[in-house]
Image (cartoon, grey):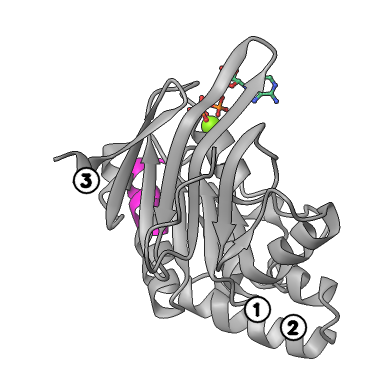
């Protein structure tokens, strides 16, 4: 079967995604699309396939069948090297527990993606500090992740996700480990910073309060997705 063409104007789109882990159908015909600069929340109960969908869209997991296109390129047939290069240059990531490198200072953590891409230390840390200012964590530049709060660490992780100028930021439960006040601040700063950089955000959450920061919501149940706006 030929997969449906991606929706007009979409930056990243998936159709008829299937992914099984043994007898578990983590994805069972999921659909997704996002426009440049759009913030889309993926919601749904635990185990419904949200993270699997995010990992497929980001080229981390290869689906068993279905199509994923990014800027007109089919992700599922790319080589691993091509997919890795795409992830490094076009995508940013924020996870539930920050995943900062404990031995590095906060500014070194934010600068890391630029350093890995070959930037000199001074230029990379200069750009990192600009993002840290926007996320209101520039005063933490010389602290190590173990010396900052959960909310501060997530804002550092958001700065790191944006430092390379990605077109898409993937955030899996970015506020899942935070209290509601810090969660709101992280979401406010993440969405403001992403919008100012015209980066799209794929946000996985099961909190309605967090999803309220999105432009659109997609609900995943038993590996199938449903676009709440188109469903109405
Ligand atoms: N690597 C894996 N190996 C085996 N089963 C997996 C793997 N990853 C996911 N699954 C299974 O696939 C289903 C969907 O998992 P997924 O992590 O996508 O759910 P989720 O919606 O993100 O849940 P949560 O809200 O708890 O994070 C679950 O039944 C899960 O146990
Ligand atoms: Mg998950």
> In the rendered structure, are the residues bearing label 2 and label 1 in contact, judged by CB atoms less than 8 Å apart?
yes
Look at 85% across and 59% down and name the residue there.
81
Between disc 2 and disc 3, whose residue precedes? 2
Look at 75% across and 90% down and name the residue there.
123
Count of numbered circles in the view:
3
* Circle on res. 128: 1
* Circle on res. 230: 3
Mark 1 residue's CB less than 8 Å from ligand 2: no
Q: Describe residue 137's horizontal placement relative to residue 76 as left or right.
A: left
Locate residue 194: give its quadrant: bottom left
Q: Is residue 153 visible?
A: no
Please tell me in which quarter of the rendered image ligand 1 is found. Answer: top right
Discs 1/3, front: 3
Q: Indicate whether residue 185 is drawn in magenta.
A: yes
Mark 2 → mark 1, Cα distance in angstroms: 6 Å
Query: Which residue extends farthest front?
Result: 1
Q: SS of the residue at dot 2?
A: helix
Crowding around mark 1 (Cα neighbors within 10 Å: few <14, some 14 to 19, many 20+) is: many
Look at 54% across and 36% down and name the residue there.
17
Q: Indicate whether residue 227 is drawn in magenta.
A: no
Q: Nearer the viewer, residue 125 or 196?
A: 196
Q: Which range of residues does the magenta coloring cover?
A: 179-186
> In the rendered structure, are the residues bearing label 2 and label 3 in contact, judged by CB atoms less than 8 Å apart?
no
Question: Which residue is under mark 2?
Answer: 124
Q: SS of the residue at dot 1?
A: helix
């Amino acid at each position: 079967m030929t997969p449906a063409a991606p929706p007009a104007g979409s930056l990243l789109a998936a159709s008829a995604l299937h992914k099984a882990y043994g007898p578990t159908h983590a994805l069972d015909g999921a659909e997704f699309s996002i426009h440049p600069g759009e913030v889309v929340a993926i919601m749904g109960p635990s185990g419904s396939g949200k993270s699997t969908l995010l990992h497929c869209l980001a080229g981390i997991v290869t689906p068993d069948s279905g199509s994923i296109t990014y800027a007109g390129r089919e992700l599922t047939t790319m080589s691993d090297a091509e997919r890795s290069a795409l992830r490094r240059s076009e995508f940013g990531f924020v996870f539930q527990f920050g995943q900062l490198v404990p031995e590095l200072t906060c500014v070194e953590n934010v600068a890391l993606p630029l350093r890995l891409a070959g930037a000199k230390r001074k230029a990379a840390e200069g750009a990192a500090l600009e993002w840290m200012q926007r996320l209101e964590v520039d005063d933490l530049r010389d602290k190590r992740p173990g010396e900052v709060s959960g909310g501060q660490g997530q804002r550092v992780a958001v700065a790191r996700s944006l430092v390379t100028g990605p077109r898409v930021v993937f955030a899996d439960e970015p506020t899942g480990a935070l209290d509601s006040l810090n969660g709101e601040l992280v979401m406010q700063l993440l969405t403001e910073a992403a919008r100012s950089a015209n980066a799209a955000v794929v946000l996985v959450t099961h909190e309605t309060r967090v999803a309220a920061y999105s432009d659109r919501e997609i609900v995943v149940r038993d590996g199938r997705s449903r676009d709440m706006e188109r469903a109405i």
